[in-house]
Amino acid sequence: MGLVAILMILACLVNLGVSECENGGTFRTQNRRKIKTDNHPASYPREPCTWTLEVSQGSVVLLTFDTLDIWPWTSRGCTGDSVTIYDGDSQGTKLGEFCGAVVPPALLSTGNNMTVVMEVGNYEAGFTGFSATFERAQPGWDSGCNDLSSWTQSKRGAIASMFYGAENYVNDAYCRWTITVVTGKSIRLTFPRNFEVETALDCSGADNLMVSANGMEIGTYCGSSKANTGPSDILSCFHEMTVEFTTDSVGTLPGFIAEFFETGT
């Protein structure tokens, strides 16, 4: 095969997004392992990267991001560099697509493997990429939105509607998260991005997000805000909070991502 032909094949592989990075590849564990972008915590190179994550049969993959710092999110979504999480291989369902500096929720696969794909554009950037941990988990930890349902004594974390950043959420869904911090502390829930949920009078009979604490409702939220913010910060006066997302059988929208923080003295 001539040199020109070889160069053409290599160029095609690059255009198809084949991983060229050093830190990518296939990772297997019976417990937990770290993955990260090249050079982290320094700036990542302008190269695509793919991580294939595998755990033992009968288990699922739980992927938790420690940091995320890539090309900024805009009101139109991830228009530059992005990290996409797939259930199974890269032909599987997109569990979410993320960019910017808001740390993604802890995502769960439905089987024993998951794929993480980093896409980059053709422009220079000075962002540090991400570091994440994946581990073996048992089925049944899913909130109903493909992410972790129970957060216990975590100082911060994130939750999101299913397929956030990749597709609209689905009809006839019910997702539930319970967040518990140290006794004596409280929880602040924030919405750093567009909040796009079906609109209805009093949020009744339509898609909505309900937040409660200590068995009492704090508020029910719906509607769309495209000013890069959702509802105002929600504060639980207790050390626990429950968040429930319910959708009806008609119409879907991009949904939401929310961060929570332990707060108080």
Image (spheres, grey):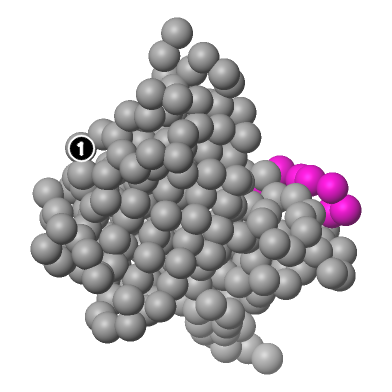
Q: In this view, does 223 lie above or below 105?
A: below
Residue 55 position, x and y percent, is 81, 61
Horizontal relation, residue 224 to residue 123: left or right: left
Counting from the top left corner in percent of width and height, residue 178 is at 53, 44
Q: Which of the pair 237/119 is nearer the observer?
A: 237
Image quarter of the C terminus: top left
Viewer-closest of 261 and 100: 261
Q: Is residue 34 magenta?
A: yes
Confirm whether the magenta stretch covers residue 206. Answer: no
Residue ID for mark 1? 232
Q: Is mark 1 on a helix, strand or loop?
A: loop
Q: Quadrant of residue 112?
A: bottom right
Q: Which of 146 and 149 is in front in this view?
A: 149
Q: Which residue is drawn at 73% across and 64% down?
A: 139
The residue lying at 27 percent from left, 44 percent from top is 219
Identified by mark 1, the residue type is Ser
Residue at x-position 76% and y-position 45%: 33
Decide: is 212 above or below 143.
above
Q: Residue 136: percent from the left, percent from the top?
A: 79, 54
Q: Is residue 172 left or right of residue 73?
A: right
Q: Which residue is drawn at 53% across and 65% down?
A: 144
Residue 96 can be seen, yes or no: no
Magenta span: chief secondary structure = strand
Residue 136 seen in the figure: yes
Q: How crowded is mark 1: few (under 14 residues within 10 Å), some or many (20 or more)?
A: few
Q: In this view, does 66 lie to the left or right of 213?
A: right
- The residues colored magenta run 29-36
Locate the N terminus and report the quarter of the image it occupies.
Answer: bottom right
Outermost residue toward the bottom? 1
Q: x, y (%) of residue 208?
A: 29, 61
